Amino acid sequence: MKRTAGIVVLAIAAGTAAGAATQLFSGSSRPADTAETPARLAQAAPNAAPAPSVPVPAEPVPLGQPGGLPSPSVPQSQAQIDLSFAPLVRQTAPAVVNVYAARAAPQRRSPFADDPFFGRFFDQDGRPPRLQSSLGSGVIVTPDGLVITNNHVVENADEVKVAFADGREFECEIVSRDDKVDLAVLRIRGPGPFPVLPLGNSDEAQIGDLVLAIGNPFGIGQTVTNGIVSALARTHVGVNDFGFFIQTDAAINPGNSGGALIDMKGRLIGVNTAIFSRSGGSNGIGFAIPSNMVRAFVQAAESGNAFERPFIGASFLPVTPDIAGALGLDRPTGALVQGMLSGGPAEAAGIEVGDVVMAMNGVPIENPDALGYRLATAGIGTTVEVEVLRRDARQTLSLKLDAAPEVPPRDGRRLAGRTPFSGLEIANLSPKLAGELDMPQDATGVVVVGVVRGSFADRFGFAPGDVILSLNGEPVESTAALESTLADSPPGWTFEVRRGDQVFAQRVR
């Protein structure tokens, strides 16, 4: 959980481990264009049969009295009577399922495990079977049974099943999951076809649009709530690494994780993931991963590949008010190119350090988070048009999005011996590994990927993500070079380590 200004960011899966809720937080039956939505009904209202003409009295008559205007409680047309979300819910709710995930909890071996009678109540290791379970929601997105949900609902699960609103239950397998995106794809083990919620275009959502949230809050069963789109492109929510969400005031609570946020045409525009809350319940501030990100994730899973963000070989900074003033911009917007990896796609496209990316494929870019989201949803192998601001002039460049290369090879090693580095698990940084570790794509050097508990390195305070810059005055360029230098060096070491934006120097005798 991440606290921001006294408000807790909660991923919204409900848990039943140890009998308590846990704050673990993140074909259509009818064509969408024929849905009986309130908007369509409202449009039909002018064609309703006209009310009988009423003689206008000479003097005002109280409401509801003979000869006066009808009482406000009297419907004016059949459309007013039928105005309801019920047809939309009947159309979409069957494709929303409850997701149950369980994993075995380790237990001590029981002295009764070998007893001829009592032994049948224990597993093969002599431990009583115990499950830790979590509860969330999911959305069926293909007729053959692919279900999208949040990663935090099924993380570390040994067993996953889905339950339909009509009482049917099916076992599932996890096809793909990613904790950085906080999405997972499941496949139902059962005969199809299954009801489907069509994916909408989340870029078409507007602030003020009516939406419905469907899920299983608090495990009480499928529930529908309504609200509006409160905000778009929300960043710095602290739920996943892409930081780009649809905000809604539709009531979302623990157990809604992975549930559907749908528009008035019956299309999925978001997967409900998190809330801001002081109490753990809904305060009307919920967040959903946009459907365009969901679509890219599902497409990767269908092709048998893990979801990857494209590699362009550049790092970015937000445009501050001071930078905007220096560039002649009327407000801070865009993504400022901070660094460039030689030979990368950005360099090949003609992008330069100091450029400001203002738009991609005609969509304005407000900040680096928005650019990362747009690149991720565009997908590897595509070519996009980026508009950059360079020295008061704008130009459009074609940028090809590639998969991140693993060059140099990571060559992972565990360091031994009696040195401050003993117990470190290290690897060579490459664009691919940097992406996995959520580091800038142009990061280079030797990175710590693990620390053995209780080792010398652990006692010296090393942590995963540290980059070893130098040893005894020499740059550290590879894992092999670092290991060789340590083997040949007498006791007494001077080294530099970068952690985030800070560099620490240490001398050990």
Image: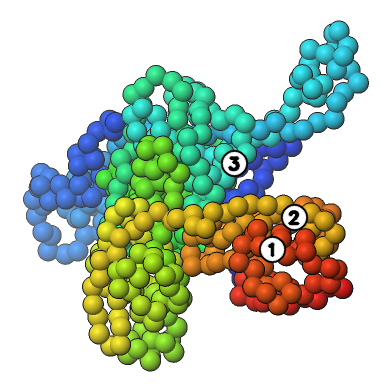
Question: In the rendered image, is residue 355 in sight?
Answer: yes
Amino acid type, mark 2: Leu
| Residue under label 1 | 482
- Residue at the spot 59% in from the left edge and 34% down from the top edge: 101
Instruction: Please say if 427 is above or below 94.
Output: below
| 216 horizontally vs 484: left or right | left
Q: Are marks 2 and 3 in contact (CB under 8 Å)?
A: no
Task: Specify whether 209 is left or right of 40.
Answer: right
> Could you say which quadrant of the image residue 509 lies in?
bottom right
Badge 2: residue crowd in 10 Å (few <14, some 14–19, many ≥20): many
Front one among 447 and 335: 447
Q: Amino acid at mark 1?
A: Leu
Q: Quadrant of residue 78?
A: top left
Disc 3 residue type (three-letter): Glu
Find the distance from the CA under tag 1 to the CA under tag 3: 35 Å
Q: Mark 1–mark 3 contact, CB under 8 Å?
A: no
Residue corresponding to mark 3: 155
Q: Verify CB contact (< 8 Å) between mark 1 and mark 2.
A: yes
Which comes before the other along the chain, label 2 or label 3? 3
Nearer the N terminus, badge 1 or badge 3?
3
- Cα separation, mark 2 vs mark 3, equals 30 Å
Name the residue at 45% across, 30% down.
187
Q: First in sequence: mark 1 or mark 2?
A: 2
Residue 452 vs residue 478: left or right? right
Q: State the residue at coordinates (61%, 66%).
A: 477
Q: Is residue 252 visible?
A: no
State the image quarter where residue 373 is shown: bottom left
Q: Which residue is mark 2?
A: 415
